[in-house]
């Protein structure tokens, strides 16, 4: 409380921090910033150690029947045309199924194989264009009881040698006593690694009574839904009639899982997931792998099956997590999954627009930076008698407005996702118009504010706005980022809840820039206090399982905050400062890892799972997956945003005309904020498998406002501070107090 009163009193008095007299006991207080860094690490660790309770899986059952239909979507269901499917969905727990496999397009064979592997697998790695090939595995029946898939040995070797996921096709069937397969797709899912299917029927018998009691696990292929229009309705109706016969023959104490196990062409979609049986009556399906009510992964089905029949999962082979049922689903089935809650339709619109949005933003920002360079050169005061004339004032003010708009683009896109633009006939045009309107309103609010002439005010308010938009979204369940243009898609299967790569970059840049601006308003010894308080809050927001749910990102942000706090008082990152920052970052990392490892395996986060795999020698696939994900993420407009922003900052700092060094001299806490942001986003991209996606999103917000601040400082580079009381004619002080405040001890000034 004493510290807080001092800070508030300093701000109320309007003290110029760097012009204040030095502390009488500097050595006595020299340890305070470093102690605060350690306290922030401990507070962050406490915030990250709390995890929400996981959902409770349904009751155990004696039998599980998995009925799969490739391509089955929620908009295929109708109470009259598909009564069996509709009744199962009404009585059971439901969700959206992401059918990601090891293939860029999950075709039926890939989907069934992934289901049987409990991991991301691929049947054939050949590239698919247009529609998926028909599901036609070679099925031999030498004894009339079971079957044999001669291609299975090749498929197992291909997944082991050419894929980074460590998938073993047939791991599910190897974990149970025996399996029953009906249809070719079910044979792919039920085959053991050497190709044997224990019980096999090419089609559902006319009288299937007793079929599903032969083994604890049965897989039934309901067919593939590939057509459109009335032909598609006929295919769905056929699948529904087959399911009705399965339900009529199901044994007592059985769980029926209905799943749209794959796509049928290259346009990835979200599919049907239904679980109906003891303990699965109503509610949303979810799992620890998604962390989002109503969303499930295809790889979650295998561990769910084994948990239901009381069998242990094979160690280190499954990537999915056991599904569970949670309350909160509306009673109206159509209102749960269709209309404004149609996640499949929204995700399809998001994927088509996200690439165009970020490509356009990258092009606009690069063009804007090219326009700013000559303005910086002309704004620089030259030592000679002649030099280039200053740029027209109207042009400079227009470029300032464009820089503000560019920095607000991603936060505006997040806010636009709160509106149902994706339900319109022209979603791309509507999204563009709405985003432009939000950007225009935000730009006007910043530009027309009375405090706009103050040097750091535009940067502070834009950064605060960006951080508030992402933070408010996290506090309300990250609904704007899920299937949002500036968020992440559930179809891609990388993330379903919490903060995404784009949101992380925007939030980190906004929070640390706000900390840097706010730190300029307090005395030099207390600047680390401001950085630590704001940064510690950001770490908890990112890492808390209730909010950002990104422990890797939280560790990266902790490192960035420690670096920013260490150099916020000015000077370089000396070895003692680096050592304290490293100790604090390691404290959070090690402490959180220890706490995560103490949890049950199914409740561990990404850090705990990785360390567990590292301990038992199975971490290779995880490292390969992260590297592969980073390689794929390089081919993104966010990479161009990151590279373009880095080049612009390099020009601003190292060229004779840039002026960024002058900004850092006037406002040393900004250099700390930029350094901390750089450390955080680079580490988050490397360890999170996002490459430059996090850095690109951060650059899209931070670089335009940093360039804007540089231009404003260059504009007043020739101003001089006058002694108190002196005036420069009737206009008042010769120095614009709004732009160039009192000098620092080093000759710089801070505002």
Image: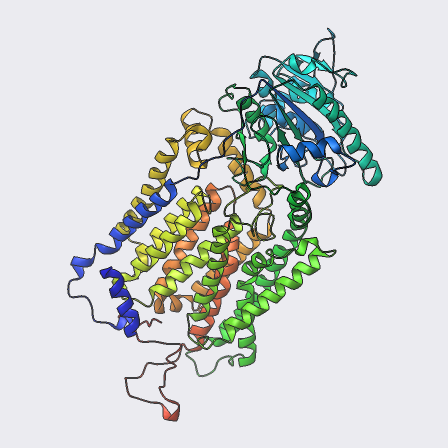
Q: Is residue 325 above or below residue 489?
A: above
Q: Is residue 500 left or right of residue 734?
A: right
Query: In front: 282, or 243?
Result: 282
Query: In front: 290, or 127?
Result: 290
Q: x, y percentage for residue 684?
A: 46, 46
Q: Is residue 586 left or right of residue 655?
A: left
Q: Is residue 551 left or right of residue 743?
A: right
Q: Where is the C terminus found, in terms of image quarters?
A: bottom left
Q: Where is the N terminus found, in terms of image quarters?
A: bottom left
Instruction: Residue 124: tell me if it is visible.
Output: no
Q: Residue furthest front?
A: 331
**Could you say which quadrant of the image residue 50 lies in?**
top left
Q: x, y percentage for residue 283?
A: 58, 37
Instruction: Residue 342: tell me if it is visible.
Output: yes
Tell me the residue at 55%/29% (across/down).
165
**Could you say which quadrant of the image residue 168 lies in?**
top right
Q: Residue furthest right?
A: 230
């Amino acid at each position: 409380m004493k510290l807080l009163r001092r800070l508030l009193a300093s701000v109320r008095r309007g003290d110029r921090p760097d012009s204040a007299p030095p502390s009488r006991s500097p050595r006595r207080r020299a340890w305070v910033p470093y102690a605060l860094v350690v306290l922030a690490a401990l507070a962050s660790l406490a915030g990250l150690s709390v995890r929400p309770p996981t959902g409770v899986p349904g009751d155990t059952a004696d039998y599980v029947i998995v009925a799969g239909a490739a391509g089955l979507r929620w908009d295929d269901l109708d109470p009259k045309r598909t009564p069996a499917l509709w009744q199962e969905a009404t009585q059971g727990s439901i969700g959206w199924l992401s059918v990601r496999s090891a293939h860029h397009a999950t075709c039926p064979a890939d989907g069934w194989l992934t289901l049987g592997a409990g991991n991301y697998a691929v049947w054939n790695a050949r590239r698919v264009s247009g529609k998926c090939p028909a599901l036609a595995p070679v099925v031999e029946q030498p004894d009339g009881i079971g079957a044999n898939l001669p291609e299975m040995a090749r498929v197992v070797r291909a997944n082991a040698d050419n894929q980074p996921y460590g998938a073993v096709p047939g791991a599910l069937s190897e974990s149970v006593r025996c399996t029953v397969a009906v249809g070719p797709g079910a044979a792919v899912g039920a085959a053991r690694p050497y190709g044997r299917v224990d019980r096999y029927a090419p089609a559902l018998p006319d009288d299937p009574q007793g079929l599903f009691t032969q083994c604890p696990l049965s897989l039934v292929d309901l067919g593939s839904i590939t057509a459109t229009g009335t032909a598609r309705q006929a295919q769905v109706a056929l699948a529904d009639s087959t399911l009705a016969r399965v339900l009529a023959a199901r044994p007592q104490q059985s769980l029926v899982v209905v799943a749209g196990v794959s796509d049928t062409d290259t346009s990835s979609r979200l599919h049907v997931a239904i679980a109906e049986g003891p303990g699965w009556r109503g509610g949303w399906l979810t799992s620890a792998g998604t962390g989002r009510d109503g969303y499930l992964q295809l790889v979650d089905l295998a561990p769910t099956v084994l948990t239901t029949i009381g069998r242990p999962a094979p160690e280190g082979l499954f990537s999915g997590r056991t599904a569970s049922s949670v309350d909160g689903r509306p009673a109206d089935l159509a209102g749960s999954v269709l209309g404004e809650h149609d996640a499949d339709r929204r995700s399809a619109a998001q994927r088509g627009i996200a690439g165009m949005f970020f490509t356009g933003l990258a092009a606009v920002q690069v063009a804007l930076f090219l326009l700013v360079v000559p303005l910086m050169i002309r704004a620089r005061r030259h030592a000679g008698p002649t030099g280039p004339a200053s740029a027209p004032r109207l042009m400079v003010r227009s470029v300032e407005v464009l820089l503000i708009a560019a920095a607000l683009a991603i936060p505006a896109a997040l806010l636009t996702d709160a509106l149902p633009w994706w339900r319109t006939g022209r979603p791309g045009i509507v999204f563009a118009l709405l985003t432009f309107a939000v950007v225009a309103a935000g730009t006007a609010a910043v530009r027309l504010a009375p405090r706009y002439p103050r040097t750091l005010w535009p940067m502070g308010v834009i950064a605060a706005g960006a951080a508030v938009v992402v933070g408010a979204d996290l506090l309300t369940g990250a609904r704007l980022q899920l299937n949002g243009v500036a968020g992440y898609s559930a179809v891609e299967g990388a993330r379903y809840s919490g903060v995404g790569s784009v949101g992380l970059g925007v939030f980190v840049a906004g929070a640390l820039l706000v900390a840097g601006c706010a730190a300029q308003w307090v005395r030099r010894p207390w600047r680390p206090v401001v950085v630590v308080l704001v940064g510690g809050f950001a770490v908890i927001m990112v890492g808390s399982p209730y909010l950002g749910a990104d422990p890797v990102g939280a560790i990266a942000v902790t490192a960035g905050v420690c670096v920013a706090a260490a150099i916020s008082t000015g000077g370089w990152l000396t070895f003692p400062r680096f050592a304290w920052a490293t100790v604090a970052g390691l404290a959070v990392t090690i402490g959180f890892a220890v706490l995560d490892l103490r949890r049950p395996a199914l409740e561990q986060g990404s850090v705990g799972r990785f360390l567990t795999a590292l301990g038992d020698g199975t971490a290779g696939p995880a490292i390969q997956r992260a590297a592969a994900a980073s390689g794929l993420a390089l081919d993104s407009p966010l990479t161009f945003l990151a590279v373009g922003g880095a080049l612009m900052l390099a020009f601003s700092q190292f060229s004779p005309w840039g002026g960024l060094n002058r900004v850092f001299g006037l406002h040393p806490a900004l250099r700390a904020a930029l350094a901390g942001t750089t450390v955080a986003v680079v580490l988050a991209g490397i360890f999170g498998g996002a490459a430059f996606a996090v850095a690109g999103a951060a650059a899209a917000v931070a670089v335009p406002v940093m360039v804007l601040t540089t231009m404003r400082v260059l504009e007043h580079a020739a101003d001089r501070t006058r002694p108190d009381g002196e005036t420069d004619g009737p206009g008042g002080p010769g120095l614009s107090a709004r732009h160039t405040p009192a000098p620092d001890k080093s000759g710089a000034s801070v505002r």
